[in-house]
Image (cartoon, grey):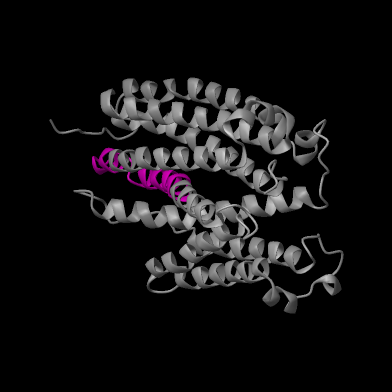
Amino acid sequence: MTLTNPRPGTTGAHRGARRSGTGPAVAVLVLVALGALIPLLGPSPALHGTGEADAPGTGGIALLRTVLFAALALPVGELIVNRLARSVPGALPTVPRSWSAAACTVGFLAALGLASVVATGNLVPDSVADIDVGGLYGTRDGKLALLEVNAFLAAALCATSGRPATQVWPLAAVIVAEALRAHPTTEYSPLIGAGLTLVHLVCASLWVGGLLHALRTLRLWRGAAAGAALLGRYARVAALLLAGVTATGVCSSLRRMPPETVLDQLTDTAYGRVLLAKVILMAGVAALALWARIRLARAADPLTACSPARAEVFVLGLVVAVSGLLTALPVPIRW
């Protein structure tokens, strides 16, 4: 049976079907946001009562990392969805305007800000004179910070060139550098931790950026039968990405919080509290993804799946913010 998708405005039934999903989607969004409200207010509430010190500039670093993660996800998502779109039978030749160049430029600025923090001994610089640029070449963290700065700059140039697909290589360099940065050599089995983080970042970037670009493409293809096919192909990829994010996230958390200490650390440490907020948000994302998948498979108009998918994008944005905060907080286990 061939799926046909009526153009907007053709029948009141389809308009009503699409509107009917908005209320529940907003309700789920509000509930999961409330579940993570306290940690999202910043590091101070998460640290309250734990006995852990609030390092200088933690809020700013968390914000910069959130921007960096978002800037990484957008171009990566565009690359995967554009590739899927080209393989869809009857795909329209039009594609959304690329956000890659702008995202990589913002990522470059965020990476530059983080490099300035590393250049002052992991402290927020009070002035330009405090930044020791030459010192970046003498430390592992400094070299990784410089790699991220240069890689984002290269990705921005590739995005504006005649071969935008080449930006995949500098973006891959950013992911590798971020995975290595998250696991210093003093940590137990740092390569295992870096490998888990690398897979986690790849899956998360493809998921977040891919879903956003898929929805932008569907809006441009409104009424075309190829839209449902594209959403179906993305949904199959997203299921694998969800499994990858979940598996690597659980393994990484257990490496830092052994099973017998998890329950205590989820409430007694800032890292654990923010991690708990991320788990709550991810549960909401999984519910929305399942809801969209059911609508895609069973609804008379498969594109009604866009309603929970849009809510999923917003919740994923909160997950990115929580992840940025998580990287700036003290790890509960000292290796």
Give the quadrant of residue 26. Answer: top right
Give the quadrant of residue 256. Answer: top right
Q: Can you say whether 298 is above or below 236 in the image?
A: above
Q: Answer whether residue 283 is visible to the viewer in this image.
A: yes
Pick the front one: 78 or 66: 66
Q: Main secondary structure of the magenta part?
A: helix
Pick the front one: 138 or 294: 138
What residue lies at 23% left-to-right and 40% top-to-bottom? 225
Q: Is residue 122 left or right of residue 244?
A: right
Q: Is residue 78 left or right of residue 7?
A: right
User: Which residue ends up furthest to the left in the rendered image?
Assistant: 1
Where is residue 202? Give x, y as percent. 45, 52
What residue lies at 43% left-to-right and 68% top-to-bottom? 169
Where is residue 301? Give x, y as percent. 28, 27
Image quadrant holding the N terminus, namely top left
Q: Is residue 228 magenta?
A: yes
Q: Is residue 96 left or right of residue 262?
A: left
Pick the front one: 91 or 52: 52
Magenta-drawn segment? 205-230
What residue lies at 26% left-to-right and 32% top-to-bottom? 6
User: Which residue ends up furthest to the bottom in the rendered image?
Assistant: 134
What residue lies at 48% left-to-right and 48% top-to-bottom? 200
Q: Answer whether residue 94 is visible to the viewer in this image.
A: no
Q: Is residue 282 magenta?
A: no
Q: Can you say whether 125 is above or below 16 in the image?
A: below
Q: How many marks?
A: 0
Where is residue 65? Give x, y as percent. 64, 53
